Amino acid sequence: MRQSILYIFLAFTLAFQACERDITLDLPDPKSFVVVHGQIEPDSFAIVSLSRNSPYFDPVDLATIAGLVINGALVIVSDGIEQDTLQPTFYFQHFTLFNYRGTKIKGQYGRSYTLKIVTPNEELEAVTTIPLPVPLDSLWVRTRADLIREAGNITPSPRDEDLIALYFKYSDPPQMGNYVRAFSRRNQETLWSSSFGSIYSDELINGQSVEFILQRGKEAYLFNDSLTFEEYGYFEKGDTIYTKWCTIDRPHYTFWNTLSAVTGGSGNPFATPTIVATNIRGIRGYGLGIWGGYGTSLDTFIVAP
């Protein structure tokens, strides 16, 4: 009986091996795009990152990435009255290298700004606004131990007593079409970071007040080996927490919302196909990415030790 089973197994194995074929795919080179990441905030100069896309299977290393950066482009920001030709710079924020910075025009609430980019092969344009700010109503905290005790069945650990969830209350204006992106940083951190759930729309809460958790930004975990994803989103007792609550226009929101959908479903064959939206318009050549304004509102919350 065992010999019969063994013979059947070997027969199936040989049959499947006989059906295998090595296939070599000759993939075409992708269309060349200028990848734009630009932003402008109140009382701040515009910053813009310009690079190129690359084939999916190209190596990802510092030399390859450095070769994608676009230097020598003409980058102009206009507020309809004045023009600002952005100058080369080197400002690294997490995984974004902003390589152009303004020197004349600072953002103002309620104003629109046009971005123009010219390279030997492309001419691109985008428009964004800095919406009026809608500040948070209030901020407060609860320990993870409190949340665990409220859920029941689990005994909090001493570490749970030190971890802090930051809550906010936000009252949405009565008019439809308000969009927000939230950032945070703590203590001596100099860079703002955003969480996976940092984009908000009033589609379901128009004109209402909501209470929710403002998670600690995900970038803090990418560069600190002492942090763990089991503690993702939490602050700690004794922290000084800085929040940046930013109103954004609809094209700006749509970009980050679709990008979040794509990155969240990366590698999942059952995920709904999503095209990342862009407000970059190609007059000559092709561009993608975002030129976005932020209507910034800042708050500080000091957590008791």
Image: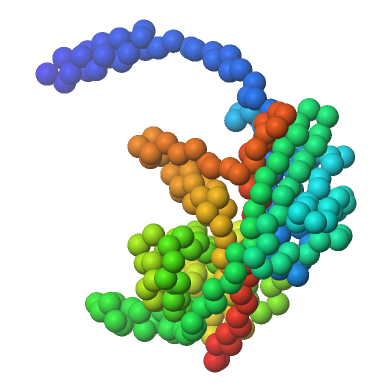
Which is nearer the eye, 128 or 164?
A: 128
- The answer to whether residue 72 is left or right of residue 40 is right
Pinpoint residue 96: horizontal percent, then vertical percent.
70, 52
Pinpoint residue 154: horizontal percent, then vertical percent.
29, 77
Which is nearer the eye, 159 or 101?
A: 101
The image shows a total of numbered marks equal to 0
Image point (71%, 67%), residue name: 108
* Quadrant assignment for the C terminus: bottom right
- The answer to whether residue 134 is left or right of residue 101 is left
Pinpoint residue 192: horizontal percent, then vertical percent.
65, 67
- The answer to whether residue 247 is left or right of residue 213 is right
Which is nearer the eye, 196 or 255?
A: 255
- The answer to whether residue 42 is left or right of residue 246 is right
Q: Is residue 238 visible?
A: no
Which is nearer the eye, 132 or 186?
A: 132
Image point (52%, 64%), residue name: 180
